[in-house]
C-alpha cells in the first residue's frame, strides 16, 4: 500500500482533466502539497492508506476556483459613494494615493482572502489598487502589508503591481499618528517599488507578483500632449520589458476603444499578457488576441460589461483563452465565482438570443483549467490530476437548491453559490472545513476590517458618502446627479 496524507472519498469528482472526467463515488489521494491519485473510491482504497480519510459522499469534489481579475483595496470601500455621480471612483483614487495606510492594506487583504476562501476561490489575481489604474506603489510598505495579509489567510494569490496612470509625478501621502505627510512620486520611483516587491514576494509561499501598466486608449492620446503620450508609451514598454525579464504575468485593466491595436503597436501582447474587460473589440482585435496568444480576463458582472460587451464567445471560437474574473470586491459584486459563471452564461445568451450559447461545462472551465492557463499555471493548478498542486474544493450538494443529487456539473454551474462550499484544501492543507476557516478567526478579520474602514472614513471625511443616495427607493432609475 502507498501512503497518503489525506484521502477525500465517496464524492463525485469533477476532475477538469484533459478528458473532463466526472467520477461518481470517486476519491482523491493527497500526499504533501500534491495530488497523488484520482480515481474511483475502490481504486484509491485498494492502493492507498492515509493518516486521514474524509467521507465526501453527497458532495462534489472539484479543483479550486481561480479568479483572474480583482482589486486589492476595494474590500474596505465597497459601496462608498456608489451610484452618487462618479464619487465611488474618486474615493478609490484618493484612498489609493493619500488615504490608505499599511494597516488598511493588511486588513483588506485578510478580508478579501477570507471571502475567497469561503467561496472556494483558491487562487486569485489582485491589483494593488484600482479606480482609473491608481496603484499604491509609492512605498513597498503597502504592498508588503497586502502580501502579509493574504499569507495570513493562506490562499494562493497573484498580486499585480505597477505605476499609476500618468501624468507623473503624482501626489501621495503617508500617515503617522494621524498626521499626513505628502510628497510627489515619480514614475521611476513607482517602477523601483514594483521591482522591489517583485524581488521580495514573487515565489514566496503561495504568492506571485505580476506587473501592470495603465491601458492606453484613444481618449488618452487625444487628451495628452504628444510628448506626454510618447512618455506614457515608453513607460509601458519599460514595465513590459521587466515582466519579460522576470518571467511574470503582465496585465492591464480596462481594454476598450482601440486599445488592443495600440497594445499590438507597442509590442506588449503575448502568451504572458492578460487583458482585462476587453469590451467592444473589433473583429481585427479578436484576431490579434488569438494570434498573439494573449489571454482575456472577462468580468461579466462588472460595470464595464454594461458599458460595452466582451466578445468572449467570439474570442473562444477564434482560439483565445478567456477566463472569468470577479472584478471584486465592489461596487456591486462579490468574489463568488459561481455568481459570475451564472451571470456570464446569461450575459452572452441574451446577446445572441440563444440559450445554447456557453454551455455550463465551458463556464466551469473558465474558472478552473482555462483560468489556470490564463495565469500560465495550467500544469500546476486548475484540475484534479496526479502531480498537480492539491488545491481542492468540496461543495455540499445536500442543500435544497442543489437537490436532488443528479447531474452535479449542471447543478454546480446553474444553482450553486459560494456558501455551499464545505471544504477547501490548498497545497494539501485544509483551510476550510465544515464551512469554517481552520487557521483564521473570521470575527477578528471582520473586526479589523470594520476598524480600518471607519478610520478611512474619518481620515478622508467620507461620512456623507456612506448613506443612501437620492432615488434609492421608489424610482425606476436614479435622478440626474
Image: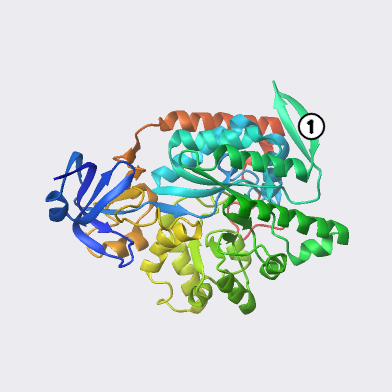
Q: Nearer the viewer, residue 28 or 405?
A: 28
Q: Nearer the viewer, residue 246 or 455?
A: 246
Q: Secondary structure at mark 1?
A: strand
Q: Position of residue 273 (x, y in %)?
A: 59, 60
Q: Nearer the viewer, residue 398 or 51?
A: 51
Q: How many marks?
A: 1
Label 1 belongs to which residue? 182
In which quadrant is the C terminus drawn? bottom right
Q: Position of residue 146 (x, y in %)?
A: 56, 37
Q: Quadrant of residue 405?
A: bottom left
Left of 84 or right of it: where is 392?
left
Q: Quadrant of residue 177?
A: top right
Relative to 372, residue 419 above or below: above
Left of 46 or right of it: where is 287?
right
* Residue that appears at 44% across and 79% down: 354
* Residue that appears at 40% across and 68% down: 362
* Residue that appears at 59% across and 62% down: 277
Is residue 77 among the parts visible in the rendering? no
Relative to 98, residue 162 above or below: below
In which quadrant is the N terminus drawn? top left
Relative to 242, residue 144 above or below: above
Left of 336 or right of it: where is 88?
right
Amino acid at each position: 500500500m502507498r501512503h497518503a496524507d489525506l484521502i477525500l472519498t465517496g464524492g463525485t469528482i469533477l476532475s477538469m482533466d484533459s478528458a473532463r472526467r466526472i467520477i461518481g463515488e470517486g476519491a482523491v489521494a493527497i500526499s504533501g502539497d500534491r495530488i497523488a491519485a484520482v480515481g474511483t473510491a475502490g481504486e484509491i482504497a485498494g492502493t492507498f492508506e492515509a493518516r486521514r480519510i474524509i467521507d465526501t459522499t453527497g458532495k462534489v469534489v472539484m479543483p479550486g476556483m481561480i479568479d483572474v481579475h480583482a482589486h486589492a483595496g476595494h474590500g474596505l470601500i465597497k459601496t462608498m459613494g456608489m451610484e452618487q455621480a462618479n464619487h465611488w471612483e474618486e474615493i478609490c483614487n484618493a484612498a489609493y494615493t493619500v488615504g490608505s495606510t499599511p494597516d488598511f492594506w493588511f486588513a483588506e487583504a485578510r478580508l478579501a482572502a477570507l471571502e475567497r476562501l469561503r467561496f472556494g476561490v483558491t487562487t486569485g489575481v489582485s491589483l494593488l489598487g484600482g479606480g482609473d489604474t491608481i496603484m499604491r506603489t509609492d512605498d513597498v510598505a503597502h504592498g508588503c502589508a497586502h502580501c502579509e495579509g493574504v499569507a495570513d489567510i493562506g490562499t494562493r494569490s497573484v498580486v499585480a503591481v505597477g505605476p499609476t496612470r500618468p501624468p507623473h509625478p503624482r501626489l501621495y501621502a503617508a500617515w503617522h499618528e494621524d498626521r499626513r505627510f505628502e510628497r510627489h512620486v515619480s514614475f521611476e520611483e513607482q517602477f523601483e517599488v514594483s521591482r522591489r516587491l517583485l524581488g521580495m514576494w514573487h515565489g514566496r509561499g503561495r504568492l506571485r507578483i505580476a506587473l501592470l501598466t495603465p491601458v492606453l486608449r484613444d481618449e488618452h492620446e487625444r487628451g495628452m500632449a504628444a510628448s506626454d503620450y510618447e512618455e506614457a508609451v515608453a513607460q509601458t514598454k519599460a514595465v513590459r520589458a521587466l515582466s519579460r525579464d522576470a518571467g511574470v504575468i503582465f496585465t492591464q485593466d480596462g481594454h476598450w476603444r482601440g486599445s488592443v491595436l495600440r497594445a499590438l503597436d507597442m509590442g506588449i501582447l503575448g502568451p504572458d499578457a492578460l487583458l482585462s474587460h476587453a469590451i467592444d473589440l473589433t473583429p481585427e482585435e479578436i484576431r490579434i488576441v488569438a494570434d498573439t496568444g494573449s489571454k482575456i480576463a472577462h468580468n461579466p458582472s462588472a460595470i464595464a460589461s454594461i458599458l460595452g460587451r466582451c466578445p468572449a464567445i467570439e474570442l473562444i471560437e477564434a482560439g483565445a483563452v478567456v477566463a472569468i474574473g470577479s472584478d471584486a470586491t465592489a461596487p456591486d459584486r462579490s468574489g463568488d465565482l459561481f455568481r459570475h459563471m451564472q451571470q456570464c452564461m446569461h450575459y452572452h445568451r441574451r446577446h445572441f438570443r440563444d440559450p445554447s450559447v456557453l454551455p455550463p461545462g465551458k463556464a466551469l472551465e473558465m474558472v478552473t483549467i482555462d483560468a489556470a492557463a490564463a495565469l500560465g499555471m495550467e500544469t500546476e493548478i486548475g484540475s484534479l490530476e496526479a502531480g498537480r498542486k492539491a488545491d481542492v474544493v468540496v461543495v455540499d450538494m445536500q442543500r435544497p437548491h442543489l437537490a436532488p443529487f443528479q447531474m452535479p456539473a449542471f447543478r454546480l454551474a446553474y444553482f450553486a453559490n459560494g456558501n455551499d462550499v464545505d471544504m477547501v484544501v490548498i497545497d494539501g492543507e485544509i483551510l476550510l472545513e465544515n464551512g469554517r476557516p481552520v487557521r483564521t478567526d473570521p470575527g477578528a478579520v471582520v473586526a479589523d476590517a470594520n476598524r480600518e474602514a471607519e478610520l478611512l472614513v474619518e481620515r478622508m471625511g467620507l461620512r456623507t458618502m456612506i448613506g443612501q443616495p437620492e432615488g434609492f427607493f421608489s424610482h425606476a432609475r436614479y435622478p440626474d446627479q
